Image (cartoon, helix red, strand yellow):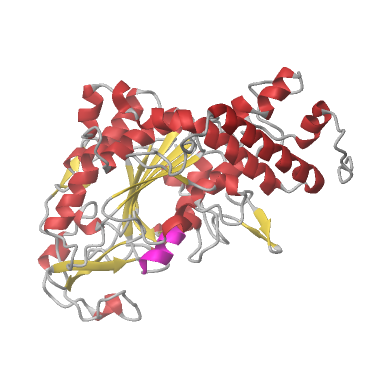
Amino acid sequence: MTDHTELTPLLARRDFLHHCGLGLGSIGLTALLASDGILSAASPAPGDPLQPKAPHFAAPAKAVIQLFMAGGPSQLDLFDDKPKLKELSGQVVPKSYTEGKRFAFLKPDSKLLGTHRSFQRHGESGAVISEALPHLATVADDLSFIKTMHTDNFNHGPAKLLAQTGYQTFGHPTLGAWLLYGLGSVSQDLPGFVVLQSGPRGPRGGSYLWSNGFLSSSYQGVPLRSQGDPILNLGSPRGISPARQQRAIETVAELNGLRFAATGDQEIAARTASYEMAFRMQRTAPDLIDISDESAHTLAAYGVTPGQASFAFNCLLARRLVERGVRCVTLFHTEWDHHGGNENLQEHFDKVCRQVDQPTAALVRDLKQRGMYDETLVVWGGEFGRTPMGEVRKSTGRDHHIEAFSIALGGGGIKPGISVGQTDELGFYPAEESQRVHVHDLHATVLHQLGLDHLKLTHRFQGRDFRLTDVGGKLVHQLIS
């Protein structure tokens, strides 16, 4: 390796550019390298952490859209019909179900709560979906369901972290960050991992839910706003001309290049790449959220009101992002924490279901119509489910339940129209222990559908190899086509 510790001010421009190997997109180094014949204009700059990488094996999916229902949607009111629970509603739960178990708020002698919602079978697959999601029911044959999901923590923050990072503590990379680490990004003008938020507040856990953790900062999720400036501070300050901005970025890149040549620190490459991406996004981000090119039919299908922030608008943005090569899009939507206090199972539950039902179904249809569904994995669910017992506050709701809850997923090579696992007659636990699907199993399966072996996708940090699935994870083979 060439020793670059002794750099001289007389170093030729061509030599400097060749050695530092850092890009500045259309305004900087990549264009200069291309003009000098060193690098093709279409090629990623050397040292770019986001340059596309080959998967471990050929796989159907190229991107993931996570529809994350922050707070924990009640599977017993949506996907898991339990006639016996309705029959015994109001009775004290048998001790055999709760002995040795802890709940976030409930006492073991709480009473069972059956849902008042009706369920029907839908499509050729006969998927069981409640009346709370009538639009989703129309795409039942395009989805599959896991009825026996399991997680480890009944508190929102740690459970969300586990759902996104595979760990209950801060400081670990999220699924989107691992995907960029393993596959890179094919989008040159937008971040490879984008986060969209809707609902009255952000999800508990905040930016840790889209963190790069100990991976390069190039892999962190970028929150995108659907109103105003897509990204805060993205625009140039008043009075700064494009030419002046270009000179400033080029100067910073030269300084970063000198430091990179001396140290080989990849975080410097990541920093320079972020300047490059920010400049390009001054043009592409406003164009992304300008939906004037979408037809009235498409807007109506999603339930989008132009200029109004909503989950529906974010679902449309998710399709537009994936269409432009973004690897992972995560939509967080609150509020699904229906204990019976400020959020209850009567008024508030139905309201939030209406907010997500039509847009979710429209997203599935839109991806299919555009030929994108087979290459886009869609995952719908929260950090945990809700208890078969009722919780009485201002009204009656349900507590957090980690033993068995439901998620829906489809596209991306997932076998459609099947249901994995079955819960007992009261909806407490898997009917058979072998049917339990842990969060790590879901992560392993998602990575597999994008061509990544979860056992091989590792990063050494502080003396040990880390992976998204920690020391667990097995493929859910029933879901794989």
Q: Is 195 colored magenta in this rendering?
A: no
**Side of 330 where 344 appears, left or right:** left
Asked if one can make out residue 382 in the rendered structure from this viewpoint, the answer is: yes
The x, y position of residue 279, in whole percent, is 54, 33
Outermost residue toward the front in this view? 239
Q: If the image is split into quadrants, where does the N terminus sit?
A: top right
Q: Quadrant of residue 465?
A: bottom right
Give the x, y percent position of residue 74.
24, 58
Inspect this view and state whether residue 146 appears.
no
Q: Does residue 95 lie above or below 196 as drawn?
A: below
The C terminus, quarter of image: top left
Q: In this view of the protein, which residue sits in the foreground, 405 or 7?
A: 7
Front residue (pair 218, 184): 218
Residue found at x 62% / y 36%:
248
Q: Image point 16% across, 51% down: which residue? A: 351
Residue 168 against residue 12 in the figure, above or below: below
Position of 447 with respect to 29 (left or right) is left
The secondary structure that dominates the magenta segment is helix
Q: Is residue 408 left or right of residue 273?
A: left
Tell me residue 439's x, y (percent). Answer: 44, 57
- Magenta stretch: give its range: 155-163
Residue ID at (80%, 34%): 19
* Quarter of the view holding residue 341: bottom left
Q: Nearer the viewer, residue 294 or 21?
A: 21
Relative vertical location of residue 380 with respect to residue 187 in this rendering, above or below: below
Q: Residue at x 25, y 35 (%)?
A: 307
Query: Is residue 354 or residue 280 the one in the foreground?
Result: 280
Q: Position of residue 466 (x, y in %)?
A: 62, 58
Residue 159: within the magenta? yes
